[in-house]
Image (spheres, rainbow, N blue to C red):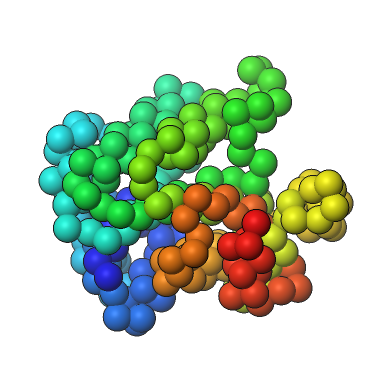
C-alpha cells in the first residue's frame, strides 16, 4: 500500500516508518521541517515537506491523492491553546476532508485514552484545549465516509516495546475502561507504532476506536478483541 503519515518526524512515526517499509509498503512521511528529511530517509520512508497547518483542503487533497491509507500522528505538543486548536483540530479535520476528496479509503488517527466530547476536563486545566481539539477531530472523522480507526493509547512512555496490550472498555459494564482499574496507565510509543502497523494491515477495524495500555495480551489478539466490539 501507499501510506501517508502526517507528523512524520514524531516519536511514534519514527518507530512506525521502518515497520511499514519493511512490510513492503511505500511510506510518505509528511513533515514541516526540511532539516528532518535525512532522518526520515534513514527510517525507510520518503520525506515529503509540507506544512499541513497552512495548507487548504484543496492543497491537501493533491498531497494525499493516490494513497491507500492516511495516518494522522501529528500534534502541536501542547502548551499553546491557539496552536493546539489549529493543528490537533482544524488541520486534522482539513486532512480528513481532503482524504475524502482525494478518494483515500482509509484514515487512522492517533488520539488518546478517554477522548470524548464529554471529557470533563475543566476549562482552566492546561489539558483542556487538547481534550477539546481531539474530541472535535475524532467526532468529525466518525461523520465521514472514510473507513476510520481511532487509535487511543494511554499515557505515552519511552520504554522498550513489549508487543503486548490491554484493550480497555470490553469488560462487564465497561468497568475496565478506567486505566486505574486495570492497574496500568501507560503504553510505550514503540508499542503504539506496532499497533498502527498492525491496524494498517487489517481491514476489519473500520469504525472502531481502540483504547489501550500495555498489558498481557499480544497485539494481534488484542486487536481481534477490538474488531469484535
Q: Residue furthest top?
A: 124
Seen from the viewer's position, the closer of residues 40 and 45 is: 45
The C terminus is located in which quarter? bottom right
Q: Is residue 167 above or below residue 109?
A: below
Q: Residue 149 placed where, x, y %?
A: 48, 53
Residue at x 50% of width, y 50% of height? 207
Q: Residue 169 placed where, x, y %?
A: 74, 51
The N terminus is located in which quarter? bottom left
Q: Classify residue 7 as left or right of residue 50.
A: right
Q: Residue 93 placed where, x, y %?
A: 36, 34
Seen from the viewer's position, the closer of residues 169 and 80 is: 169
Q: Classify residue 188 as left or right of residue 148.
A: right
Residue at x 61% of width, y 38% of height? 115
Dividing the picture into quadrants, the one containing residue 35 is bottom left
Seen from the viewer's position, the closer of residues 204 and 40 is: 204
Does the rendering let one see residue 79?
no
Q: Residue 147 placed where, x, y %?
A: 40, 52
Q: Is residue 227 above or below residue 23?
A: above
Q: Is residue 128 above or below residue 98?
A: above
Residue at x 60% of width, y 28% of height? 117
Does the rendering let one see residue 86?
yes
Residue at x 23% of width, y 59% of height? 67
Q: How many marks?
A: 0
Amino acid at each position: 500500500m501507499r501510506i501517508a503519515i502526517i507528523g512524520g518526524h514524531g516519536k511514534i512515526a519514527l518507530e512506525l516508518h521502518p515497520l511499514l517499509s519493511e512490510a513492503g509498503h511505500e511510506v510518505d512521511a509528511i513533515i514541516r521541517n526540511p532539516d528532518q528529511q535525512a532522518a526520515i530517509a534513514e527510517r525507510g520512508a520518503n520525506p515529503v515537506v509540507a506544512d499541513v497547518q497552512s495548507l487548504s483542503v484543496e492543497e491537501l487533497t493533491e498531497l494525499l491523492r493516490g494513497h491507500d491509507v492516511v495516518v494522522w500522528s501529528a500534534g502541536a505538543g501542547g502548551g499553546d491553546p491557539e496552536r493546539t486548536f489549529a493543528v490537533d483540530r482544524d488541520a486534522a479535520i482539513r486532512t480528513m476532508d481532503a482524504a475524502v476528496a482525494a478518494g483515500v479509503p482509509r484514515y487512522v488517527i492517533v488520539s488518546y485514552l478517554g477522548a470524548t466530547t464529554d471529557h470533563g476536563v475543566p476549562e482552566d486545566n492546561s489539558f483542556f484545549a487538547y481534550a477539546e481539539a481531539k474530541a472535535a477531530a475524532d467526532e468529525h472523522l466518525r461523520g465521514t465516509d472514510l473507513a476510520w480507526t481511532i487509535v487511543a493509547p494511554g499515557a505515552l512512555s519511552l520504554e522498550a516495546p513489549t508487543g503486548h496490550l490491554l484493550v480497555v472498555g470490553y469488560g462487564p459494564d465497561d468497568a475496565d475502561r478506567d486505566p486505574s482499574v486495570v492497574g496500568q496507565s501507560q503504553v510505550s510509543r514503540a508499542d503504539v507504532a506496532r499497533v498502527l502497523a498492525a491496524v494498517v494491515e487489517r481491514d476489519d477495524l473500520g469504525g472502531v476506536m481502540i483504547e489501550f495500555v500495555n498489558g498481557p495480551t499480544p497485539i494481534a489478539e488484542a486487536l481481534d478483541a477490538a474488531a469484535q466490539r
